[in-house]
Image: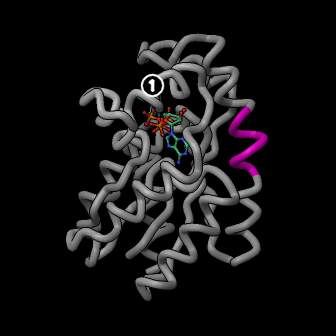
Amino acid sequence: MRIVLLGAPGSGKGTQAERIVERYRLTHVSTGDLLRAEVAAGTPLGKQAKSIMEAGELVSDQIVLGMIEQRLGKPDTRNGFLLDGFPRTLAQAEGLDGLLNKLAQPLDVTLLLEVDYDEIMQRLLARKRADDTEDTIRNRLKVYDAQTAPVIDYYDKQGKLRRVQGVGDVRAIAERIFQVLDNSA
Ligand code: B4P
């Protein structure tokens, strides 16, 4: 199965992604994790990404698409993958479609985790990552509304979007997701 997991920052994409990949034996590809690894390793890409991430802005489409192309070229993605935190812009969504067409591996389903912004603010302030200050979170939500909302429409028009309520017990949310995925397989 090939899945995209969408949702606002802090909607629980990373949390649910771990459960989904375990159940369906998929490869987990998180652009946030890939970027944080570059920052931690101090690579030129990481140095460029660090201040962008700390301001709550999006790293450039070109960099992120290059990273994804490289990652999806590895053999461990052949039996299915979950993209977590990607695509975040229309250009990334279109780039991904082009790439997956070339690989003859179309997406099966896009899951949207829905959580209201008050709840998100509380969750992220409790987490205390470098990009989890109040100002940065507000900016990330603004960027999400402006740049990622069109991605939701894009997949909706393709008939691939499935919405899941992301509030409440983590295991109960996972069960709702599994139901959707079992019906999409
Ligand atoms: P990401 O790493 O994707 O981070 P995120 O959106 O903050 O987190 P996520 O939704 O995964 O939330 P989580 O499960 O951790 O992005 C970070 C930055 O990287 C971006 O701002 C951007 O700068 C850059 N970036 C990444 N991808 C990019 C792209 N494609 N293009 C450009 N730039 C990109 O959950 C959050 C918290 O909530 C956790 O503390 C968790 O424990 C808690 N939680 C989860 N589920 C819960 C529940 N049901 N109830 C209560 N708490 C819960």
**Residue 142 drawn above or below residue 170:** above
Left or right: where does residue 114 sit relative to residue 38? Answer: right
Q: Quadrant of the N terminus?
A: bottom left
Q: Quadrant of residue 22?
A: bottom left
Q: Residue at x 62, y 21 (%)?
A: 137
* Image vertical order of residue 62 relative to residue 73, above or below: above
> Where is residue 73 shown, x and y percent of the image?
31, 71
Q: Main secondary structure of the magenta part?
A: helix
Closest to the observer, 112 or 150: 150
Give, as a three-letter code, the residue at label 1: Lys
- What residue lies at 55% left-to-right and 53% top-to-bottom? 62
Residue 101, above or below 15: below
Q: Is residue 4 above or below residue 127?
A: below
Q: From the viewer's side, name the closer residue of 75 and 116.
A: 75
| Residue 64 in the image, given as x and y percentages of width and height | 49, 50
Tell me which segment is drawn in magenta. Answer: 143-149
Closer to us: 48 or 76: 48
